[in-house]
Image (cartoon, helix red, strand yellow):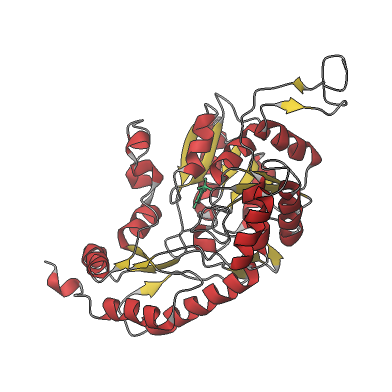
Amino acid sequence: MIPYGKQEISEQDKLAVLEVLASDFLTQGPKVPQLEEQIASRVGAKYGVAMNSATSALHAACLALEVGPKDIVWTSAISFVASANCAIYCGAEVEFVDVEPGTGNISVQDLEKRLIEAKQAGKLPKVVIPVHFAGQPADMVAIGKLASQFGFRVIEDASHALGAEYEGGQVGGCQDSDITVFSFHPVKMITTGEGGVATTNSIELYSRLQRIRSHGITRDPNSVESEFEGDWFYDQIEIGFNYRMTDMYAALGSSQLTQLDNFLSRRRKIASKYTALLENTPHSQLVQVEGRRSSWHLFVIKVDSASSRKVVFDKLRQEGVLVNVHYRPIYRQSYYARMNKYDVDSFPGAEEFYSRIISLPIFPSLTEQEINKVVNCLVSSPGHQTIF
Ligand SMILES: *Cc1c(COP(=O)(O)O)cnc(C)c1O
């Protein structure tokens, strides 16, 4: 069996976790701020706030930007459901933007068109959440320009994109956004088991994110609203959650981060190998835009025709290649479809994309032999000629 993605845990990773287990702090000790600083410095942001998942971090990011009932949040039609759910948690309405069929990333053209219409209708979004699909950055400069023109805030869902580069800068530096969120789920670029981090350059958003992560409580004497009563004192000034990361997770994250460059280079090698081998097949890979460097969280192919996708997918699975499909458009999920407000016809890019995609295995320890096996299965797949 070859999975589509999996973690790589070293001896050093195991020792890092064991060391925490023998220490005084299992949660919110020294390892959490250490990981936050390492991530922030790696991606070129001022601050990082680690949480127990990227889903928590997305929710906290929406709350930090004051998303609430009556607000509208837009995200990409092709993503994991968490990109949209975070706005629902806040009581907001979710709308989707179509994707570019070549990359699976949010279509800036469609975004602009919808913004002009929304402005006329008085229904502009408060926040837009672009997703760096498969690890390839979305067009952040263009999105940043639209944000200032139409007055919305931006959260980058970079769950796939730790280590990805955009115009020479690292994703996560928040040059064109307010907050960026990364995931440390085992299939992602580095792992803490469960976990995620939000990066930002704003000190206000930083303290807001920290507060929401821990029940809405602060000990900062400048933020408390009631009178200081003694050294035991803390004040809950808003509603928050327990979204904290443990020190075991954070120690694993720091240890994994030292491997990130190795993981990236291995993933990039696998991607170029697939690219070369795919030339002998009728299938294509996603368009890679100049000036953007993918982290290759996923290697997505587009099968030559929608009618042969299922055949190719089933063949690979039968051969023990555990391919996947990332993603079924979020508006197709029953929870969202039931709202009866999303018209499939207004997402031609997402529909075309979804009908043809398959995610091939990609992870640092994938071997040459395994890559060859995957591509051989693709070559020997019965093509569209068997379908009528
Ligand atoms: C994995 C993922 C998430 C959620 O990450 P968790 O850490 O599992 O909560 C959110 N958005 C996208 C695009 C993802 O791929």
Q: Which residue lies furthest to the left in this view?
A: 388
Quadrant holding the C terminus: bottom left
Figure check: 237 above or below 303: above
Q: In the image, residue 119 lies at what x, y percent?
A: 57, 36
Whether residue 14 can be seen here: yes
Figure check: 103 above or below 46: below
Q: In the image, residue 7 lies at what x, y percent?
A: 50, 62
Quadrant holding the N terminus: bottom left
Identify the residue at image location x=48%, y=69%: 363
Whether residue 65 can be seen here: no
Q: In the image, residue 165 lies at what x, y percent?
A: 65, 66
Q: In the image, residue 59 lies at what x, y percent?
A: 58, 36
| Relative side of 135 to 4, left or right | right
Q: Which of 134 and 74 is in front in this view?
A: 134
Q: Which of 332 and 89 is in front in this view?
A: 89
Figure check: 249 above or below 310: above
Q: Quadrant of residue 274?
A: bottom left
| Relative side of 47 to 377, left or right | right
Identify the residue at image location x=32%, y=32%: 338
Q: Nearer the viewer, residue 183 or 343?
A: 183
Identify the residue at image location x=73%, y=61%: 42
Identify the residue at image location x=84%, y=29%: 220
